[in-house]
Image (spheres, rainbow, N blue to C red):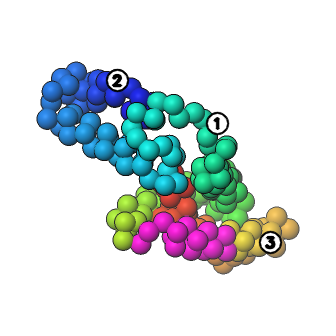
Amino acid sequence: MIQGRPEDALKSLARLHSRGNINDQFVQGEYQEMLSKVQEEANMEGGWAMVSDFSQICTFTNLQIFKDKTNLRKVFYGIILQFSVQMTGVSAIQYYAGQVYTSVGFEDSALLINSINNAMGIVGQILCVLFLDKVGRRIPLVAGNIVAGSMFIGATVVARNFAEGTGTRAQGIGFVACIYIYNIFFSMCIGPLSWV
């Protein structure tokens, strides 16, 4: 639709929702809503297209992203946000969970601990879906990064004791608690909101 191909957009909607029937009531409703949103954004100051009418959308080029400061700022927000998500350490925890929990004294229950952690992540994502429209995006992103960052620092401090061979069972439990809190805030705030 943004590329000036409304007929193709209509055919795609029909293929997805009504087995190719472009006259389907739902398809027509979705099509009109898309058309309205594209026109609205085209008319909005600071919008991606920054054009005055729908017919001009066809001439919008990717270079406008770099020429206009507002568009460039939006692109950098997206890049920085996705970069910051990766820098939270979530990948290390998810990919190496078994070894991580084993290294802090939970050799026999690493799988169970990780399963609980994953379930808590699902709970966090459900909470995000339920409350995002009421709370907004900025506060959860800021608060989520503060809490998740603090918990990751706490977990790292505790894990250092285990690397030095001085870790205790209580410290292992503290490590797991930090990771659980980290994960629920990541799943509730950072992970899903980075895509929104």
Is residue 19 something one can see in this rendering?
Answer: no
Q: Which residue lies furthest to the top in this view?
A: 20
Of circles 2 and 3, the one toward us is: 2
Question: Is 114 placed left or right of 92 in the picture?
Answer: left
Alpha carbon distance from label 2 to label 3: 60 Å
Which percent across, then down, holds residue 173? Answer: 62, 73
Of circles 1 and 3, the one toward us is: 1
Name the N-terminal-most of marks 1 and 3: 1
Residue drawn at point x = 23 percent, y = 31 percent? 17
Q: Is mark 3 on a helix, strand or loop?
A: helix
Question: Is 59 placed left or right of 11 in the picture?
Answer: right
Name the N-terminal-most of marks 2 and 1: 2
Residue denoted by label 1: 63
Along the line of sight, which residue is nearer the eye, 172 or 49?
A: 49
Residue denoted by label 2: 8
Q: Residue furthest bottom?
A: 170
Name the N-terminal-most of marks 2 and 3: 2
Determine whether label 2 and label 3 are within 8 Å by CB: no
Residue 193's label in the rendered image is none
Amino acid type at mark 2: Asp
Which percent across, then down, holds residue 6? Answer: 34, 28
Q: In which quarter of the image is residue 109?
A: bottom right
Is 146 covered by the magenta stretch? yes
Residue denoted by label 3: 161
Which percent across, then down, holds residue 150? Answer: 67, 74
Q: What are the residue bounds of the magenta stretch?
A: 135-150
Instruction: Tell me the crowding category of disc 2: few under 14, some 14 to 19, or many 20 or more residues within 10 angstroms, Cα based.
Output: few
Alpha carbon distance from label 2 to label 1: 24 Å
Amino acid type at mark 3: Asn
Which percent across, then down, holds residue 61? Answer: 57, 33
